[in-house]
Image (cartoon, grey):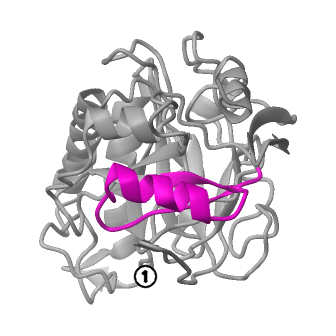
Amino acid sequence: MSARLNGVLALLALLSVSSFTVATSEVTGCRGGRFRVRRVILSCLVVIITPICGVLSSGKPAIADTFVIQTSSDIQGGDTCSAPTISQMQTLWNQSPLNFDDFNIYYAGGNRCDTTQSNLTTTWMHDVGGFNPRIYPMSFNLIPTNVSWTLPYKYCTEQSNPYQLDSNLSRDYSLGGFAASDGINQAVALGITSGPLYLDIEDYYPNNTYGGVSCRSIADNFIQGYTDYLSGNAYYRAGVYVSSCSGVTDYASFPHPPQDVWLANWDGRLTTWGIGCVPDSYWYGDQRIHQFTNQSPTWSPVSIDRDCENGDVTGQTPNETPDSESTNEDPGC
């Protein structure tokens, strides 16, 4: 068993997959024979599209292995529109920088750029996630993102997708719950048994209106439907990916605020603090990911939009039932 695998297994025994509640350092793995210590501050690099740095977690495994999708570390990550093949992921692992260990997956939602995701299977999760080291010596931390409904195009956002919200706020709220339910089903099908499931909101204009209703209200109702649905779940946590200046602070006043936030602000700063429009007093308990830049490096054969993340997200140990303490009720504001 490789030193890197030993390190990863040591981490899995300590951290859980999605949001992390620890703000200390843990030995998580090594490349080239040397161990790396990760602080609980995530640097996620996004490949080809903007997604979400998070972590697959474990609870009751849906397949033979338990996935710990950790979103906590001082590392980089990325994503692609379509999940690459397993061999391409191995090449990416071999050729990318030492701290490129996180990989976002568009695992659910009808607005994904690739709704088929033919490569994204339980076998892919198993091999890419580090459970087949003799054949594929890699262990990516996988981050699940749900691209379901988007706000009305041109009125509220520049995202043009087939499934859109509208001015019917009760419908928007219900669709948020549906997105959460579908996300859970898709997560279980892939063997993701606990952790944060990120809802992809993107950038929107909160002060614009559509059909006589503010875009802020449309977004808030949709996201609240999502977080309310997940608030009673013992295994999964509600995460949101959104531009930091699109009304994020509204979410803090929800009855069940998002437990983790992925804030897109391409300010080039490798830190989760001092992010535009979001005071440091909000989501301060290891609950942030910062997407700080958008570049496009290529590690053949995988091209990556370097939407780098730096963040810290809380979580549980693999054998621990996810809690519902303060981060479940209060995002830290």
Residue 62 or residue 126, whichever sits in front: 126
Vertical position of residue 94 compared to residue 287: above or below: below
Amino acid marked by disc 1: Tyr
Vertical position of residue 42 compared to residue 303: above or below: above
Vertical position of residue 136 compared to residue 10: above or below: below
Q: Residue at x 23, y 61 (%)?
A: 149
Horizontal and vertical percent position of residue 34: 84, 43
Q: Which residue is mark 1?
A: 205
Residue 37 or residue 292, whichever sits in front: 37
Looking at the image, which residue sits at the far bottom? 154
User: Split into 4 quadrants, where in the image is the N terminus?
Assistant: top right
Residue 4 seen in render: yes
Residue 160 or residue 245, whichever sits in front: 160
Q: Residue at x 23, y 77 (%)?
A: 152
What range of the chain is rendered magenta? 74-103
Horizontal and vertical percent position of residue 47: 47, 69
Q: Residue at x 52, y 67 (%)?
A: 46
Horizontal and vertical percent position of residue 157: 34, 82
